Amino acid sequence: FYTPAEVSRIMAMVIGIGTAKSASQSVHDLACGSASLLLKAHDEALSRTSLDLALYGQEMDNATAALAKMSLILHDCPTAEIWQDNTLSSPHFTQADGSLKTFDFAVANPPFSTKAWSNGFDPANDLYGRFAFGIPPQKNGDYAFLLHILATLKSTGKGAVILPHGVLFRGGAEAVIRRNVVRHGFIKGIIGLPANLFYGTGIPACIIVLDKEHAAARKGIFMIDASKGFLKDGNKNRLRAQDIHRIVDTFTRQL
């Protein structure tokens, strides 16, 4: 489903993309859709640092991947690399030794709670070692996407992913994975969003902010409940400029 521009902007800002130091730094989206998140991250970095970061995206749907390529060209990002295939079963961006390519930043809005996430590969014998923290439930792939993002972030990498609220409290295999991710300090923060923001679903969602660079020293997770700050717009809710500012300012200051 489509990611509202306001949410895209929040994600780009909370991962600190405005602090990029070199044009060789990279941004990845494992389920890039029409590339709206990649474009927002690119524009945020360009406006704050004048750096034209390298963009990489993978999208399973053929028509949507073609749309992403066209959109990036039209927005003056002709060198962006978009690949059409299933990221979980067939990740395209790899190193010469066959391991996963790693990136400086990651943004993603993967499909919520997909049941077919393990089609085409065996998670228990994953070639890329993505599921050392645990294997997600067979019929719910939310944590599969999060674990893939963690595996593709550099040791100093930072990312943000939109997931349904259920990832915060569901039990079973997901509780095991969640405990392991938290214990390693990879989650910097969680931002609870208003319900009914996204076209295609009314499920309440949150932004999970990941940060590998300071994971070892992390003592807790900064949590923001931003579910009440929005403008009702027809049958959808919408974030206003003041809501975006409040979220980003609070997250940045962590007061």
Image: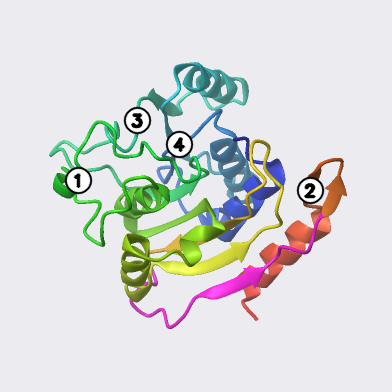
Residue at screen point 45% across, 48% down? 106
Q: Earlier in the sequence, mark 3 or mark 1?
A: 3
Q: Which residue is mark 3?
A: 86
Measured Cα–Cα span from mark 2 to mark 3: 31 Å
Residue at screen point 50% across, 75% down? 221
Image quadrant containing the N terminus: top right
> Residue 212 appears at what percent x and percent y?
37, 64
User: What is the number of the mark on residue 230?
Assistant: none
Measured Cα–Cα span from mark 2 to mark 1: 39 Å
Magenta range: 213-230
What amino acid is labelled 3 in the image?
Asn
Circles 2 and 1: CB atoms closer than 8 Å: no
Q: Earlier in the sequence, mark 3 or mark 4?
A: 4
- The secondary structure type at the circle numbered 3 is loop
Q: Which residue is mark 1?
A: 128
- The secondary structure type at the circle numbered 1 is loop
How dense is the environment of label 3, judged by Cα within 10 Å: few (below 14), some, or many (20 and up)? some
Q: Main secondary structure of the magenta part?
A: loop
Image quadrant containing the C terminus: bottom right
Q: Which residue is mark 2?
A: 237
Measured Cα–Cα span from mark 4 to mark 2: 24 Å
* Of labels 3 and 1, the one closer to you: 3
Q: Dividing the picture into quarters, in which one does residue 243 lie?
A: bottom right
Circles 4 and 2: CB atoms closer than 8 Å: no
What amino acid is labelled 1 in the image?
Tyr
How dense is the environment of label 4, judged by Cα within 10 Å: few (below 14), some, or many (20 and up)? many
What amino acid is labelled 2 in the image?
Asn
Q: Which residue is mark 4?
A: 31
Residue 225 placement, left or right of 115:
right
Residue 222 part of the magenta segment: yes
